[in-house]
Amino acid sequence: MDLYATLGSACADRETLSALFREGMTAARLNLSHTSLRGCAPLLDAFFAAASDAGVRPRLVIDLQGPELRVGTLARPLALPAGGSAVLGADGIPVPRSVIETAEPGDRISLDDSALLLEVISRENASLRCRVSRGGTLQSRKSLAILGREIGSPALTDEDRANLRDASGFGATDVLQPFVRGADDVRAVREALGEAGLPHIRVMAKIENRRGLDRLDEIIAAADEICIARGDLGNAMPLWELPRRQKEIARRCREAGKPFCVATQLLWSMHERAVPTRAEVLDIYNCVLDGASGLMLTGETAVGKYPVEAMRYLAQTARTAQS
């Protein structure tokens, strides 16, 4: 079983990375939504040096931008109090033009994996006027989704293609393709890898929207591995439906003989706490019993206060389930 840490500021030094390997890390995810492989060269140098220290040949999974929607760059973090108003687009929070063109009054817009929630009141020229239903502080480049709507966009951005060309030189073994909508998205990644002379790199398809669920069988057939990405998948439906969907994806992967990993909020409380909740370790245990071939920590190791402890609880719980 692969145990993934997401690389980030909380584990950027060789000492912490070595400790993660000692606790059981076998693979790492590098999120390229905000950066590039070249921009992460010092972090990757530390990662592979720590792997050498530990005698481990790790997998390095690069998580592309793909068709994911994000808020643009803000001058500073923006407070959005509940009950207040917000403007998206011109003279407001920068968002992709496709969001302005698609959203209708009454639509709900999720920001930062639903940490914040807006309701569209009106569309005026190049902007959306919204009411803040769930408030908080918005940071630059956070995820955005119009709940219940799909927005057309290409499978790969120009930045994705540049990162794929650099993938081999930085030690990447796998590509994690977000928001996969069908086999064509997987084929687009494989074609780009072929053009870069990298047909051996594995393609992991993230299931995180309704279209991916609707075309799950063809995605399973096209990809090397499936990633059940519960963050945005939970935005695509009422949250109480998510456990059933996770179980369904796991079952269909098992029936097809396709490996799958589970990601997002496995140990979310460990961003701030040195010990996880009972519900979190039970979740990990059940993922293993369902046949997961991998478990992926995200913010717990990238920006959390206790990255090494999080990997310890992940690994020990997974080993207990396997035994």
Image (cartoon, helix red, strand yellow):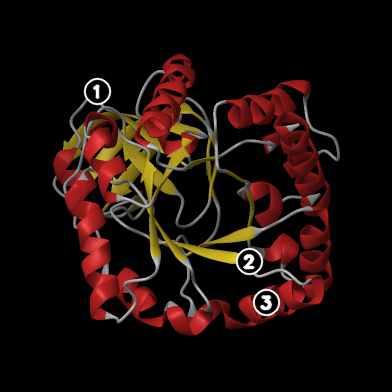
Q: Amino acid at mark 1?
A: Gly
Tell me which numbered mark, 1 or 2, is placed earlier along the sequence: 2
Tell me which numbered mark, 2 or 3, is placed earlier along the sequence: 3
Task: Give x and y (percent) for residue 26.
Answer: 67, 58
- The image quarter in which residue 212 lies: top left
Residue visible at 37% across and 71% down in the picture: 200
Residue visible at 37% across and 52% down in the picture: 224
The secondary element bearing badge 2 is classed as: loop
Which class describes the residues within 10 Å of circle 2: few (<14), some (14-19), or many (20+)? many
User: Marks 1 and 3: in contact by CB < 8 Å?
Assistant: no
Residue visible at 31% across and 72% down in the picture: 199
Which class describes the residues within 10 Å of circle 3: few (<14), some (14-19), or many (20+)? many
Q: CA distance from mark 2 to mark 3?
A: 8 Å
The secondary element bearing badge 1 is classed as: loop
State the residue position of label 1.
106
Quarter of the figure that contains the C terminus = top right
State the residue position of label 2.
58
Q: Which mark is residue 98?
A: none
Task: Give x and y (percent) for residue 116.
Answer: 48, 34
State the residue position of label 3.
48
Residue visible at 66% across and 31% down in the picture: 284
Q: In screen coordinates, is 322 left or right of 117?
A: right
Task: Give x and y (percent) for residue 55.
Answer: 77, 72
